Image: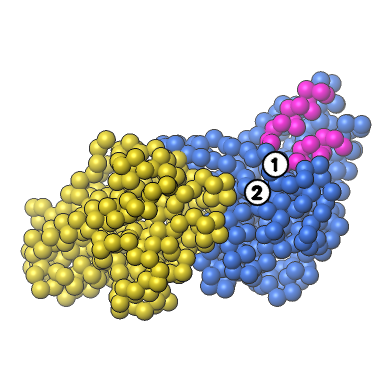
Chain colours: A blue, B yellow
Amino acid sequence: VTALAPRDVVRLEDGAVVLLDQRQLPDMEVELECRSAAEVAEAIRTLAIRGAPAIGIAAAYGYALAAQNGEDLVEADRMLRSARPTAVNLAWALDRMRDEPTPQRAREIQQQEEDDDRRMAEHALELFASSPHVLTHCNTGALATGGYGTALGAIRLACERGRVEHVWVTETRPLNQGSRLTAWELERLGIPFSVIGDSAAGSLMQAGRVDIVLTGADRIAANGDTANKIGTYGLAVLAHHHGVPFVVVAPASTIDRRLADGAGIPIEERAAYEITSRFPAHNAAFDVTPAGLISAIVTGAGVHRQPFSFA
Amino acid sequence: VTALAPRDVVRLEDGAVVLLDQRQLPDMEVELECRSAAEVAEAIRTLAIRGAPAIGIAAAYGYALAAQNGEDLVEADRMLRSARPTAVNLAWALDRMRDEPTPQRAREIQQQEEDDDRRMAEHALELFASSPHVLTHCNTGALATGGYGTALGAIRLACERGRVEHVWVTETRPLNQGSRLTAWELERLGIPFSVIGDSAAGSLMQAGRVDIVLTGADRIAANGDTANKIGTYGLAVLAHHHGVPFVVVAPASTIDRRLADGAGIPIEERAAYEITSRFPAHNAAFDVTPAGLISAIVTGAGVHRQPFSFA
C-alpha cells in the first residue's frame, strides 16, 4: 500500500510549481515543472492537474510563484482564475492569496484542504453502516485534492474500517479519469475494485449490486445544487430510481455561497476531439445535479441533509 | 448521400460469406471473406459483424455455406447458434434454415428482414410528430440489420420526411458502435448529428434537448422486457424521469415468444480488456429494460403499446 502524499500531487519548490502530470497516468509517473503563472494556468487548462480542490491549490502556488518572480499579479490572478470556468475553487484559493501572496500561505491552504478532507472522511463513515458495495464517478482521490481525497478519501477510510468490500469505478468518458486515475489510486491502496463503462451503472443498481454512490463536486450552490463531472446527474437519477443513497463529498472551498442555485453555474464545454476526432461531437464537461436528488452532502463541518442551506 | 445496400453488409458469393468488417470502421472499409461455418461464427464472436438482425442473416448464410461445403451441419448449427448468447436472432435464423439449407433461403431471410425494417420505419413515423431532437444508442442502422436498419432506419425515414432535425449519438462504450458506426452511417446519409459521451444523455434530457429516445433490441420477451446494449436501461430510466418517450424498434426475429419475461435472457459478459487492459473490469455487454419503462415497441406489424403481449 503506497498512498500518494499531498506534495507528490502538487508543491512549490525552487522557483517552480511541480506537479504529477495526470495526463500521463497510469502509464507514466512524470513530474511537470511550471515556472510562471502562465505555465500553471496552462497545466490546469490542459488537465495536467485536475480536480476542483487540487486546481485551487495549484492556482495558489502559481500565484505565490508569480509574486516571487515579480510577475504582474493582476494578470497572474486573471490567468489562473479563468483557467477553467466550472470549479469555484480557483476563485476561492486566489481570493485567499491576495492579501498574502506567499509560498507559506499557499502551503497553509493545501494543509487546510487536507485537514478538511480528513474530517469529511470521518464524517462520511456513518453513511457506510451497511454499504459494502460503493460506486464512484470520475476521480476524487488524492490526485483530485492534493490532500486525502473527497469521495475517494471517504471510501478509503471506510475501507480501512472494514465497511467497504468493493468499489465500482466508472470509466468517466471522455478522458477516463475513473479508469486511469481512480483505478490507479485504488490499486496503490489495495482496495478491491472493478472498472465499468459509464453506462453500466444502471444495470448494477437494478441488480442490487450498488449500496451507495459517492461523488465529489466542482461547485455547490447555496441550495445544494451540485455541478460535477458529466454523468453525475444521470447517476443521481438512477440512484433515486433504485432507492440507493447518492452522496456528495466536498470541502468548503467548493461551495459557492453567493449562488442561490445551480442555474448560475457556468458549464465548461471542451473540445469535440476529446470525444471523437472524426465526427461532430458535443462535449459538456460537467452537469448539475439538483439538490432534491442528493441524499447527503458531506463537508468538513459534518453530514448535511435536505433541505440544504449553505448561504 | 450514399446509403449502404444490404449486400454491402453481408452476402454469400463464390463459396464465401462476404461481410464488411465492422471492426475496421470508420477508418477502413475492408471486406472479410469467411469460407466455413467456423469462420462465420468467429466473425460473429469477434464483432466483425454485429447487430442482432445482421448476425442472424450472417448465420443463415454461414449455414448455407456449410451445406454447400459438405460440412457437418449439426456442428455448423451448434457453432453458429452459440457464437453470441444474448441475441435470439441467431436461433431464429438457424431454425428457419434447417429444412432448406440453401443460399436461396438465406437470401429470402435477408430480404424479409429488410422488408420488415421498412415496415417498422413506416409505422414509427407517427411517433415523430413533434420530436425533432432524437437520441439513439449503439448502432441500429443498415450495418446492424443487413437491411434498412431498426431504430436508425426509423430515424432515417423520419428525417427524409422532415420530422427529425438532429440526432444525438451516444458513443456506446466500450466498443464505440455509436461514435464509429452510427456516426459513419449518419454522415453518409447526410443526417445532422452530434456524438456525445454515454453519460451526457441525462443532462441533455434535463435541458429539454431530447424529444424521443429510440433503440434497437437484442431479445424481447413475451411481456416486452427488452435486452439491448449496455446502457439502454439507464437511458430508459432517464427518459422516464424526464417524460421523454422511450421507443424500441425491432423485427419479429428479435422477439423470443417462449420467454415470459426478461429474467430468462442470458447476458453476455465480454472480456475485461475491452474496458481497460490495465485494471480489473466488469463488462456485461447488455442490460434488460423492463417493459414498464418502454413507451412503445415498433415491429413490422405496427406500433405496440403497454401492456405488451408477444406470446
User: Which residue matches tag 2?
Assistant: A288
> Could you say where residue A206 lies in the image, as x and y percent from the top left?
53, 70
Q: Is residue A267 visible?
A: yes
Query: In the drawing, does residue A2 fall left or right of residue A202?
Result: right
Q: CA distance from mark 2 to mark 1?
A: 8 Å
Residue for point 20% across, 55% down? B114
Q: Is residue A93 magenta?
A: yes
User: Which residue matches tag 1?
Assistant: A265
> Could you say where residue B226 lies in the image, as x and y percent from the top left?
39, 67
Question: Please, what secondary structure does the residue beneath circle 2 have?
Answer: strand
When asked about the image quadrant of residue B183, the answer is top left
When asked about the image quadrant of residue A294, the answer is bottom right
Residue under mark 1: which chain is it in?
Answer: A
Which portion, as a residue range, is magenta?
A73-96
Query: In the drawing, does residue A266 fall left or right of residue A7?
Result: left
Q: Check disc 1: other Cα within 10 Å, few if <14, some if 14-19, many if 20+.
A: many
Residue for point 92% across, 32% down? A100
When asked about the image quadrant of residue A242, the answer is bottom right
Looking at the rendered structure, the kind of residue marked 2 is Val
